[in-house]
Image (tube, rainbow, N blue to C red):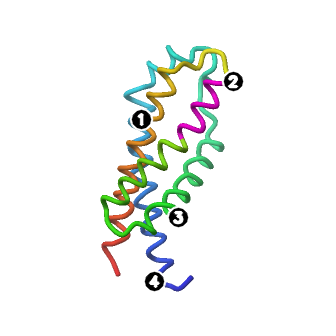
């Protein structure tokens, strides 16, 4: 990978990661924390495990950048592909949980899948924009 390509990747990664962290932090920490406590009850830990959470964010954003941000040729395409990646990734998690765990509801699965589509759409759009700012 050349220096220009590496710079573009890093800009895309940082832009996408920051956008995703801000959005998901607001969603999980402010907007939905009480709802998740009601819907998941005893399944939730009192405090999240930070290492697996960090690995998820770092890995998920690699997928966003490699599969969406860098291949996209326009920001609307980045947004559409981001939404698709989000619904597929979150759907894999949520539908598997709904199929195998007591207490995982259709309401929770659909709500979380919609969130995954939205958050990934916006984050990939931001990553795309940031990566295109410098040549």
The quadrant holding residue 100 is top right
Q: Residue at x 48, y 80 (%)?
A: 5
| Tag 1–tag 2 contact (CB < 8 Å) | no
The magenta region covers 90-99
Percent coordinates x, y for residue 17 in the rendering: 46, 55
Pointer 3 local density, CA inside 10 Å: few below 14, some 14–19, many at least 20: some
Percent coordinates x, y for residue 47 in the rendering: 59, 28
| Tag 1–tag 4 contact (CB < 8 Å) | no
What residue sits right under mark 3 in the picture?
Answer: 66
Q: Quadrant of the C terminus?
A: bottom left
Q: As rendered, which of 1 and 91 lies closer to the eye?
A: 91
| Tag 4–tag 3 contact (CB < 8 Å) | no
Q: In which quarter of the image is the N terminus?
A: bottom right
What distance separates the C-alpha of mark 1 from that of mark 4? 35 Å
For residue 100, the mark is 2
45 displayed left or right of 109 = right
Which type of secondary structure does the marked residue at label 4 adopt? helix
């Amino acid at each position: 990978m050349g220096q220009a390509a590496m710079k573009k990747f890093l800009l895309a990664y940082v832009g996408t990661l920051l956008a995703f962290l801000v959005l998901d932090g607001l969603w999980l920490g402010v907007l939905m924390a009480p709802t998740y406590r009601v819907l998941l009850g005893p399944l939730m830990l009192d405090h999240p495990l930070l290492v697996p959470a960090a690995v998820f964010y770092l890995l998920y954003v690699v997928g966003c950048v490699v599969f969406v941000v860098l291949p996209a040729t326009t920001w609307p395409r980045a947004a559409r592909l981001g939404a698709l990646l989000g619904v597929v990734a979150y759907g894999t998690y949520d539908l598997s949980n709904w199929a195998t765990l007591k207490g995982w509801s259709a309401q929770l699965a659909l709500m979380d899948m919609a969130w995954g589509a939205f958050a990934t759409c916006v984050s990939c759009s931001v990553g795309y924009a940031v990566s295109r700012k410098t040549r």
